[in-house]
Image (tube, rainbow, N blue to C red):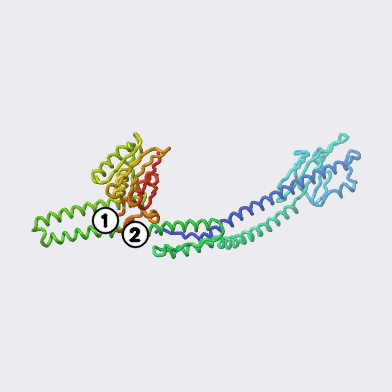
Amino acid sequence: MKLRFMLPSIKIRIALLYSLIFSVILIVLNASVLYGLKYYLIYQSFADISNQAETILNKLSVVKGDIDFSNENLVFSIPENTYLKVIDKNGKVVYKSRETEDINIPYKSDINIPVKIEKDGMHLTYINEIYNRDGKIFYIQIIKNMESQYLFLKLLFVLMAFADAVGILISLIAGYFVTRQAIKPVDYMVKEVNDIDARKLNKRLKVYGNKDEFTRLAVTFNSMLDRLEDSFRRQNTFISDASHELRTPLSIIKGYVDILDRWGKYDKNVLQEGIEALKKEEAEMEKLIERLLLIARGDSRNLKLNKETFILNDILNEVIKETSMLNRDRNIVLNMDDEIDIFADKSLIKELLRILLDNAVKYTETDGKIEVICKREGQNTVIKVKDDGIGIPSDEIPYIFDRFYRVDKARTKETGGAGLGLSIAKIIVEAHKGSIIVDSKIHKGTEFTIIFPF
């Protein structure tokens, strides 16, 4: 059985993180102050005993071979927490400032060097000096007990520890409330987003004037909702239109099947007519489904391109020849540069050209002129398909690439197609990182310009 640990909320985690950072900084600063003060007091003690030793050396005098300790200034100049020892060269203590104190520290080492030691639970600093006059040698030892300084450091440590604890507690509480206030917009976003579903895609997050990270997040989320809503709308329209387009051939197929089932199978003429009609509708449905699949792949950015380098002139000649044979009452003219090579998907480029030419033929009257131009312009390959047909109203140009859209609403499926051609054309062009431009005037014709990067 696996145990699951619930993480605290982000407000608590941020507050804990801030409190931890504040605690570390506070502890490091306080420790630095304590250690700095400790070593300052030690060095101050070194300075005191060094000055004390120098003063005593200047005040000492030898009378009849012994040190004269009758000088009152010698005794009064020694502070209460400082001890003086005078030792002769044989190791005999000839003078002690306090009889009750018996601190044994080596006196022949570390001459004229202040030293800090821990001895018998006491914090001591001492310095050894040599008195050498008139052949007389004595060792002078000054010892200072730092008990009061260390007591002050302990008291300061307790106060700082208490202040740290209070500071950490305050930082934790303040951090929680500040964090809660700071991420309040997130709570609002969570509440609003939970209310959004497929039926409420028109709902948007409120964006306030402050240009902070949460505002940018709200703007980005609203932008995503715009794209999602548009995608759902286009999907619903696509499904509705596709269902409508498929319903017609299915109705025809169902009608012929019913006729053949009842009595047509006994009449050879009716049987042959029904078979040909079924084949035709099957081919139309297959073509429609293939185009729908191509559009679906384009929408999902899953359209695979089998790119290769080929001569565009050959493809143009082939497509124009096919279109001219099927539409001998149209005058199709080709103007192109010599040997224009292009790196693209040959089958898709051929489909693109067929769509544009078929579209031009449908909207050009008998004996009308269709001109195809192919040339290089700088680093681009440009293909233009111009006709002198009925043209496209300016207010309808933005919609001609929508699926199942027909400019001439009076055209039937047989004369006007399913309305998918230009949608597929745009998908093919954009898949090749190109662009498509439309220029049209009523009763003067239409010009489609395709631009492919070289």
Q: Which residue is mark 1?
A: 413
Residue 119 visible in the snapshot:
no
The secondary structure type at the circle numbered 1 is helix
- Please name whichever residue, 174 or 84, is drawn nearer the observer in this view of the structure: 174
Neighbours of disc 1 within 10 Å: few (<14), some (14-19), many (20+): few
Q: Residue 216 location, x and y as percent?
A: 52, 56
Q: Residue 322 location, x and y as percent?
A: 25, 43
Residue 267 visible in the snapshot:
yes
The secondary structure type at the circle numbered 2 is helix
**Horizontally, is 310 left or right of 56 in the view?**
left
Question: Can you say which quadrant of the picture contains the C terminus?
Answer: top left
- Please name whichever residue, 64 or 105, is drawn nearer the observer in this view of the structure: 105
The Cα–Cα distance between marks 1 and 2, rounded to whole angstroms, is 18 Å
Mark nearest the camera among 1 and 2 is 1
Q: Which residue is mark 2?
A: 237
Name which of mark 1 and mark 2 comes first in the sequence: 2
Q: Quadrant of residue 248?
A: bottom left
Type of amino acid at the residue the image marks with label 1: Lys
Disc assigned to residue 436: none
Q: Are marks 1 and 2 in contact (CB under 8 Å)?
A: no
**Horizontally, is 220 left or right of 46 in the view?**
left
- Please name whichever residue, 334 or 345, is drawn nearer the observer in this view of the structure: 334
- Tell me what residue is drawn at x 61 percent, y 55 percent: 22
Type of amino acid at the residue the image marks with label 2: Thr
Q: Quadrant of residue 140?
A: top right
Residue 161, placed above or below residue 92: below
